[in-house]
Amino acid sequence: MDTTRHPCFNKDAKGQYGRVHLPVAPKCNVQCNFCDRKYDCINESRPGVCSAVLSPHQALYYLDNILDNDPRITVVGIAGPGDPFANVEETLETIRLIRNKYPDIIMCLSSNGLGVPDVVEDLARLEVSHVTITVNAVDPAIGAGIYSWIRHKRKMYRGEAGAAILLERQLDAIRLLKERDITVKINSIFMQDINHTHLPEIARVTRELGADIQNIIPLLPVKNTPFEKVPIPDPTDLLNTRDACEKEIHQMRHCARCRADAVGLLGKPNTPECLALMEEAAKSPLRPDEHRPYVAVASHEGLLVNQHLGESKVLYIFDPETGDQIETRITPAPGKGDDRWRDMANLLTDCATLLVSGIGPRPMQVLVKEGLRVTLMEGMIDDALQDIRTGTPIKSPVRKFKCGTACAGTGTGCG
């Protein structure tokens, strides 16, 4: 595969060509002990972080504007903020939309590998040319200390059993991708006293399966994770480890540890212009599809979007194509913390968008993580449905809203 215009796979392309990561994959199927996925965190630059999650159509809208804004973009990647194949429908739909409109653009994916074997044929058919698999251990005993759990085929696995399943799937993914002539990069995180002496073995095993390049990334300790106290690697140790691994497989040494919504040249922060384009795309309502045809609304009377989610006892469900109200649904009772918002997400699996006049940060995080687009607005429901129907951003303003006693009086709507 041609890597001359891919800045992550070719260091000589780093200052000439750029990439854009489309954050369309909020859910993850592996919980790593070093990872805490967050949203609305502009000042952090690390995987798992993005300022918004987009639907496939929103991502295409965003990409159109990005390409108009920066002609140096040659690569479109999907790298989270969760895992692309824990969100397989959204990921593949995004790729289809982009490939139909931009047949010559380089398509790139980054994954933990757990779901990759199931979609290799799809990736080859859609001409995805570059895939990164994160492999942090090729020994389940070591992997058991890195992963809290994995979710495979709707079942949760922990310890060595989970690490063994993940490893088997990762190795299968590399082999199957290389059989289809897809360029494979291995990301491995250098974790002091956890896997750092094991990294040359990862290099050897993955190279024997045909992997093209390895990227050893120094651990960035993140607060509120099991590895928050693990020390940052000494630069000399990191260099020596890369040199040792170079004997097995070519090393990438110019990684910028990109966000899930990174855009532009490697090592450069997202510009204010790109942030504004992301915000505009995120405000564009999700277009209904066969999987999520409806819109949910927090409303006092079913005519206006005028209620805070934490205070809503019912949600009104509309079909945006006809403008008709389908039904009302009773919301989960307060008092269960995050479980309340997960229950609400399960209540709205057929809804693409939730319209509210206010919402706390934690319910916003949980609902977005579960794949629901939450739009803050006030105004006529009919006007919002018209915007959704035509695929234009909702323009209704949002007034300042203070939570009341119905959402526990915390000001966050997280009762």
Image (spheres, rainbow, N blue to C red):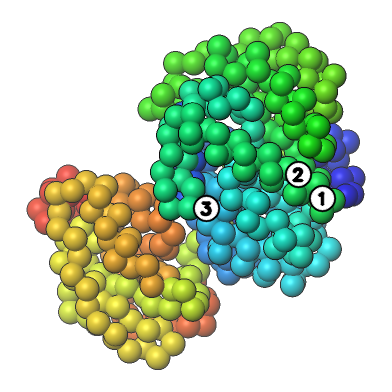
- Could you say which quadrant of the image residue 10 lies in? top right
**Mark 2 highlights which residue?**
175
Farthest residue to the left: give it: 405
User: Between marks 1 and 3, how big is the CA–CA gap?
Assistant: 23 Å
The amino acid type, in three-letter code, at marker 2 is Arg
Q: Amino acid at mark 3?
A: Ala
Q: Which residue is mark 3?
A: 86
Pick whichever, 61 or 102, lies toward us.
102
Q: Residues within 10 Å of mark 1 (few under 14, many from 20)?
A: few
Specify whether residue 39 is in view: no
Asked if the residue at tag 1 contacts the one at tag 2, i.e. Cβ–Cβ closer than 8 Å, the answer is yes
- Relative to the observer, which residue lies in front, 121 or 404? 121
Q: Secondary structure at mark 1?
A: helix
Q: Which mark is residue 105?
A: none
160 left or right, relative to 266: left
Q: Is residue 301 above or below residue 11?
A: below
Contact? badges 3 and 2 (CB < 8 Å)? no
**Local crowd at mark 3 within 10 Å, few (<14), some, or many (≥20)?**
many
What residue lies at 76% left-to-right and 65% top-to-bottom? 125
Q: Any mark on residue 179, and which? A: 1
Q: Amino acid at mark 1?
A: Glu
Query: Which residue is rendered at x = 27% and y = 58% of the image?
Result: 343
Q: Nearer the viewer's eye, disc 1 or disc 3?
A: 1
